Image: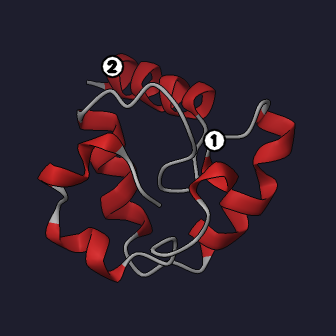
Amino acid sequence: MTNPKDSQMPVWRQRAACRGVDPDIFYPVSDEEAEDAKSICRGCAVQELCLEWALSNREKEGVWGGATERERRRIIRRRRRTA
């Protein structure tokens, strides 16, 4: 998946299952259309690292680490409540 932030690409992204895949898959119009991207993420060796990167960088769009933006917001809220 290519992104404007690739100039600062973390090393783990070189091992990502999405590497070389059409990035449009990871930017679905709705959460319901995110399943293709999520299925790629489920088989990825760096899924957790990707998700943590997206959470810590407050990535606003797309599917990262198998989670949509809405799902990432829920994760952040849940973590705040348990902190």
Q: Which element carries disc 2, helix, strand or loop? A: helix
Q: With respect to residue 31, does 77 lie above or below?
A: above
> Horizontal and vertical percent for residue 12?
23, 72
Residue beneath disc 1? 27
> Horizontal and vertical percent for residue 54?
35, 41
What crowding class fits label 1: few (fewer than 14 Cα within 10 Å), some (14-19), or many (20 or more)? some
Q: Are marks 1 and 2 in contact (CB under 8 Å)?
A: no
Label 1, label 2: how far apart the Cα atoms are = 26 Å
- The picture quadrant where one finds residue 19 is bottom left
What crowding class fits label 2: few (fewer than 14 Cα within 10 Å), some (14-19), or many (20 or more)? few
Q: Amino acid at mark 1?
A: Tyr
Q: Which element carries disc 1, helix, strand or loop? A: loop
- Tell me: 42 left or right of 34: left
| Nearest the eye: 16 or 55 | 16
| Nearest the eye: 14 or 72 | 14
Q: How many marks?
A: 2
> Horizontal and vertical percent for residue 28?
73, 40
Residue beneath disc 2? 80
Which residue occupies 25% across, 43% down?
Answer: 5
Which residue occupies 24% across, 35% down?
Answer: 56
